[in-house]
Image (cartoon, rainbow, N blue to C red):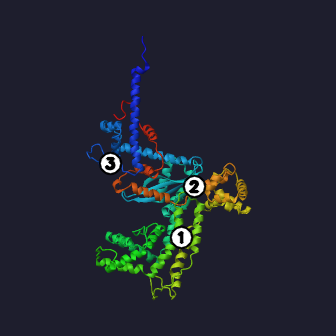
Amino acid sequence: MTSEEPTSSLPYKLNRQNQAQYHRNIMLLEKIIDAVILCGKQNIPLRGHRDDSTSDSSNKGNFLAILQLLAKHDEHLCSHLQTAKKNALYTSKTIQNEIIQIIGNHITGKILKGLQGRGFYSIIADEVTDKYANKEVLVLCLRFLDSREHPAIIREEFIDFANIERTTGEAVADKLTEILRLLAIPIENMRGQAYDGASAMASEKRGCQGRIKSLNQLALFTHCRSHVLNLSIASACKLPLVRNMIDVLNSVFIFFDSSPKRQRFLETSIENDESVDFSRKKLVGLCKTRWVERHVCFDVFYSIYKCVVKCLQNILNQNLNESTDEDWSWDRQTKVNAQGLLTSMTSFSVLITFVFTRFVLDTIKPLTVKLQKSDIDIFTANKLIGEHVDRIKEIQDLDIVVKTPRVCSKQQHRENMATNNPGDYYRSVVAIPFLDFLLNELDTRFQKEDLAAYSICSLLPVYITNLSNEELSKLASKLQFWVNDLPCLSIQDLEKELKDWRRYCVNMSKETSDKLCNLLNLFNYVDGDVYPNVKILLHIGCVLPITTCEAERSFSGLRRIKSYMRSTMHEDRLTGLALMHLHHSVEIDPKEIVELFIRQGKRRLFQSSLFS
């Protein structure tokens, strides 16, 4: 009896052949996944109008076109696309959806790894109407402290899009809790929730925040600070003169924007004006919803004001336009509209109101930018708001002396102040009412809803060093709100640790104290072994939300992804594509996706050919 060499046996040869085929199939699958990742991250539509196997269209979509391009440089992929059976190509919409969903779950899993440890977090949610599919879409974002980084960082991350049947507080709360349950995120670890001020979201009894609080009393509600600032400015701009000025700006914008010919004439006037090098050649419209962004419109209008006036004058009198040889002819209605706009723009009441309103909005502009940062905390936001309110209070005098409008017995569209002094008139009808109204709105709307949340700010060295023993006892009582999160056994233990922390801060150098100017810096500085309660309280303070800007940014991504050509996209596919597109910086390893794809269902990996 003779023995064969193991390497020459039939089972060994078949096994080697299967292994080689297996690795080739894996490589093919990786290239298919690479194409999906490319389309998802770059927001490239995958499917064509006719991309199924029965279509004879030459254009079957970007996904298949990318695969065909790769096949020109890969003979295995080329052979697969040409010879594999139609039901085994692994390029169908069903396989696409599976891969997209796996990639989305993979990205979500990477994000949620930041919730390891105590896992405190806050939710940020908002709702928008998908105008193409005519559906209500709810977005969920998480704010948490990622301690995997050194130092730790505050992160606000998009998690999910979900269609909702109704926008009642109950429906929104149920959908949010359902998403958290599916993602295995414990609602007990939620410490904050941020929404807009709509009653369905903000109501304490029947709104979303009230229903979430019934499940977790520690989930403190924050009315988006950017929305609050927006509402304050919008209310102040209801003054008659301010309202009229805004109408004039909007009418001038529409006059030029609605006509390519008039817009080109304005651009020609700006180009021929050699006195100033203008970077802007087009007026900017007033934002309909974000009032705090109107300073951009004001800045552009201010910079090209003279050119706009000259352009309107040239439309009325063509003989004035000597800067160009082109023949510009205008119909009667255009001249009538130009005359009305020119009269309004050169009115002193409009000009003085415009200059003053622009000055006040420029004062608030840095605040609007800072509030949109994802890593801002409650202390920094409150401090910035206070500083800008104080700056507005410093605005007092208007050193302009021009004639006042006439006074009549009854007037509804402007103020009817009986005075002959122009300075007193505009100070009385514009400056004082606008500032008083704005300051009153800011003071009223920016009240501290949750004193317990703002009491965490007292742990900063700049504050705690000035607290007496009695004030420290009151602070400990307020911080007992989170007693279940703290390792201290009693309020006396917490008070003792606060006294030790105060003593440490008193002996701290001024340079160190100045660096610890916000909750995040202080969290990274504090030793959790020595001051465990202070460390946990700072962790909670860092995750408390300030605005819903991350949700708004997610809606911008939604508008880029969900176009009228993709109006029937399913919810899971939309979420997967959005996760790839909005988390563009997240590294995705195709090999990991292949493993997840194989595990998800029974795959013919060890047959003679994976795709046959």
Tell me the kind of residue under disc 2.
Val
Badge 3 marks a residue whose secondary structure is loop
Badge 1 marks a residue whose secondary structure is helix
In this rendering, which labeled residue sits more in front, label 3 or label 1? Answer: 1
As measured in the structure, the alpha-carbon distance from the residue carrying label 3 to the one carrying label 1 is 50 Å
* Residue at image location 38% in from the left, 31% down from the top: 21
Can residue 247 be seen here? The reply is no
Q: Are marks 1 and 2 in contact (CB under 8 Å)?
A: no
Q: Position of residue 355 (x, y in %)?
A: 48, 76
* Residue at image location 59% in from the left, 64% down from the top: 382
Tell me the kind of residue under disc 1.
Thr
Residue at which label 2 appears: 543
Residue 61, disc? 3
Quadrant the N terminus occupies: top left
Q: Which of the two residues, 276 or 432, is positioned nearer the viewer here? A: 276
* Residue at image location 45% in from the left, 59% down from the top: 127
Neighbor class of circle 1 (other Cα within 10 Å; few <14, some 14-19, many 20+) is some
If you read the primary sequence from the N terminus, does the residue marked by circle 1 or circle 2 appear first? 1
Residue 587, disc? none
As measured in the structure, the alpha-carbon distance from the residue carrying label 3 to the one carrying label 2 is 43 Å
Quadrant the C terminus occupies: top left
If you read the primary sequence from the N terminus, does the residue marked by circle 3 or circle 2 appear first? 3
- Residue furthest to the top: 1
As measured in the structure, the alpha-carbon distance from the residue carrying label 1 to the one carrying label 2 is 28 Å
Tell me the kind of residue under disc 3.
Gly
Residue at which label 1 appears: 363
In the image, residue 519 sits, relative to residue 420, either above or below, namely above
Can residue 362 be seen here? The reply is yes
